[in-house]
Image (cartoon, rainbow, N blue to C red):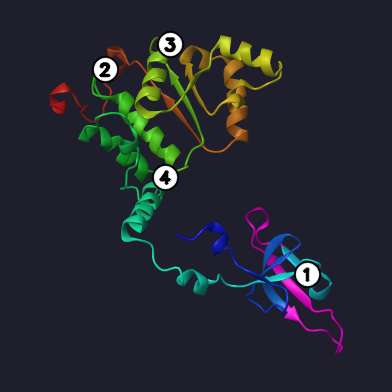
Amino acid sequence: MPTVDELQPRPDSSRLPQPGDVVRVRARRHLVADVAAPSRIGEQQTLVSLSCVDDDSQGTGLDVLWEREIDAEVIQESAWTDLGQRGFDPPQLFSAFLHSLRWNLVTSTNPRLFQSPYRAGIEVMAYQLEPLRKALLLPRVNLFIADDVGLGKTIEAGLIIRELLMRQKVKRVVVGSPASVLLQWRDELESRFGLTFVVLDREYVLRCRLDRGYGVNPWSTHTRFIISHSLLRDETYAGPLRDWLQTQGPGVLAEIFELTADFLKGYERTPRRTAKDKS
């Protein structure tokens, strides 16, 4: 199998660029947009209009006098002739390489291809995939999971969080839950999905201030948190959370509620799954 160095394009500093060529100028790669010949014969002042193709400066325009540039080079196509002389890889080796690429590529454009169930240490029931299916079809994930006790709401929420993280649709996750199930959620998310969450409480905030200074925002010290509802209603914690959400990338806020019978009384909704449905 060819190495990375063998696949790198080869530079050529012996010829003038043409529109459409890829060149390296001033330690960056550019696409040649236009080439203007010198106005006088014998002058070495070919004006070349470039457009940067590097990720950190894509589309930035640049006009240079080609002959006056020290490191100007035309990047030729890869030397496929040299690679072809080495022959083909064995079918088993190429198949293993191809399957490894397919496994690591998460298709964010196809919501019917799940990845998280295969990366979790659990036995997934068919009905537990329904919230995940609905979440991937939504432009903005906003679900209310209200299954009965014992049917795996933690698993359903964990599958969604894991899938969104793998598809790089979110970077940060905040789980708000009653204080009674705080540690339970932390342990289950780590043991079943390999997701490490930090419990954000008064002790954690104090530890962050001792280590990093009083002005540190504790939400900026990690990407996945679990916090109790009582602290989440406290402006001391909610204010820095809003600042963190405004300055960082997309995230998920998952809230776990303990709904009482009085709250659900008279609430019109679709029938919930019960233990009978599970069997």
Callout in the foreground (4, 1): 1
* Residue of label 3: 179
Q: Which residues are magenta?
A: 35-60
Residue 213 visible in image: yes
Callout in the foreground (3, 4): 3
Residue 144 visible in image: no
Q: Residues within 10 Å of mark 3 (few under 14, many from 20)?
A: some
Q: Residues within 10 Å of mark 4 (few under 14, many from 20)?
A: few
Q: Which mark is residue 265?
A: 2
Q: Which mark is residue 139?
A: 4
Q: Position of residue 34 (x, y in %)?
A: 70, 77
Count the labels in the image: 4
Cβ–Cβ under 8 Å for marks 4 and 1: no
Q: CA distance from mark 4 to mark 2?
A: 31 Å
Q: Amino acid at mark 4?
A: Pro
Q: Amino acid at mark 3?
A: Ala
Q: CA distance from mark 2 to mark 1?
A: 71 Å
Q: Residues within 10 Å of mark 1 (few under 14, many from 20)?
A: some
The answer to whether 171 appears left or right of 36 in the picture is left
Secondary structure beneath label 3? helix
The answer to whether 185 appears left or right of 71 in the picture is left
Q: CA distance from mark 3 to mark 1?
A: 62 Å
Up/down of 62 relative to 93, above or below: below
Cβ–Cβ under 8 Å for marks 3 and 2: no
Secondary structure beneath label 4? loop
Cβ–Cβ under 8 Å for marks 3 and 1: no
* Residue of label 1: 63
Q: Position of residue 2 (x, y in %)?
A: 48, 61
Seen from the viewer's position, the closer of residues 237 and 67 is: 67
Please name the residue shown 42% across and 19% down the image: 186
Q: CA distance from mark 3 to mark 2?
A: 24 Å
